[in-house]
Amino acid sequence: ETGVTQTPRHLVMGMTNKKSLKCEQHLGHNAMYWYKQSAKKPLELMFVYNFKEQTENNSVPSRFSPECPNSSHLFLHLHTLQPEDSALYLCASSQMDLNEKLFFGSGTQLSVL
Amino acid sequence: DAKTTQPNSMESNEEEPVHLPCNHSTISGTDYIHWYRQLPSQGPEYVIHGLTSNVNNRMASLAIAEDRKSSTLILHRATLRDAAVYYCILSRRIQGAQKLVFGQGTRLTINP
């Protein structure tokens, strides 16, 4: 248990569906991240939030829409995804302004049919 | 983003030390060297990090070259639970948050 909880653990969706991934951290951190891990590819940083403000969008397509309502919660809203978006989506958190570690959740395994 | 180079895979025996190398010749003065590992079906787990000096913690040791262009993660006594993909990452801060750019990592196999 890392203190970062992601739900759901598994998600299957069609290309016309709209779904959301949820991440919650209980560590008192104020920076949160979304990473994508496709099969046989390195983890890719998608979005970074500091104190609820988005500070990094790593050229992510608009069909992925992040939301950070407070420093403990992070969402990734999905709509009109493609089969190539199937991947493990990982959330992480850290404390800002320190060169400290990231804590990762176990991820949501997403399959787009 | 500065890149790291690691061997694709390594193999060792249980209860023996393991030295995992990493090259980072384009490292800048403010980049920290982080190591994470990822077990199957889990998110990455922090192992250790450092800037210039060697570092020790309960999981491992990190040896950093004097010119900082390479580093070595040392597992002193490998167990079967240490079998994972190990990532060497250069970390820099972006407006306070950590930007970790992962590479392919080294898949470590531990033989009983």
Image: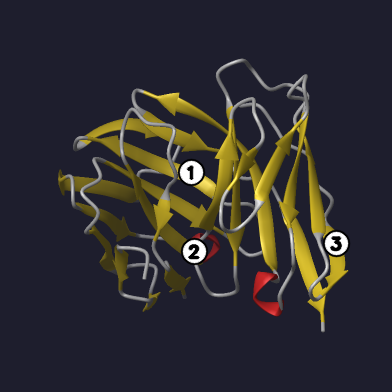
Q: Amino acid at mark 3?
A: Met
Q: Report the quarter where the N terminus of chain B lies.
A: top right
B18, B92: nearer the viewer: B18
Q: Is residue B78 visible?
A: yes
Q: Are marks 1 and 3 on the same chain?
A: no
Indicate left or right for A42 with A112 as reference.
Answer: right
- In this rendering, the answer to whether A102 lies above or below A3 is above
Judge depth for marks 2 and 3 and give the one in front: 3
- Specify the label residue A45 is tagged with: 1
**What subunit carries mark 1?**
A
Query: Circle 2 sits on which residue?
Result: B43
Query: Circle 3 sits on which residue?
Result: B10
Q: Amino acid at mark 1?
A: Leu
Label 1 and label 3: CA atoms lie apart by 26 Å
Q: Amino acid at mark 2?
A: Gly
Task: Give the residue drawn at x 19%, y 38%.
Answer: A52
Label 3 Cα neighbours within 10 Å, binned few <14 / some 14-19 / many ≥20: some
Quarter of the figure with residue A5 = bottom left
The percent position of residue A67, horizontal first and vertical second, equals 21, 47
Label 2 and label 3: CA atoms lie apart by 21 Å
Name the element at disc 2.
Answer: loop
**What subunit carries mark 3?**
B
Q: Are marks 2 and 1 in contact (CB under 8 Å)?
A: no
Quarter of the figure with residue B15 = bottom right
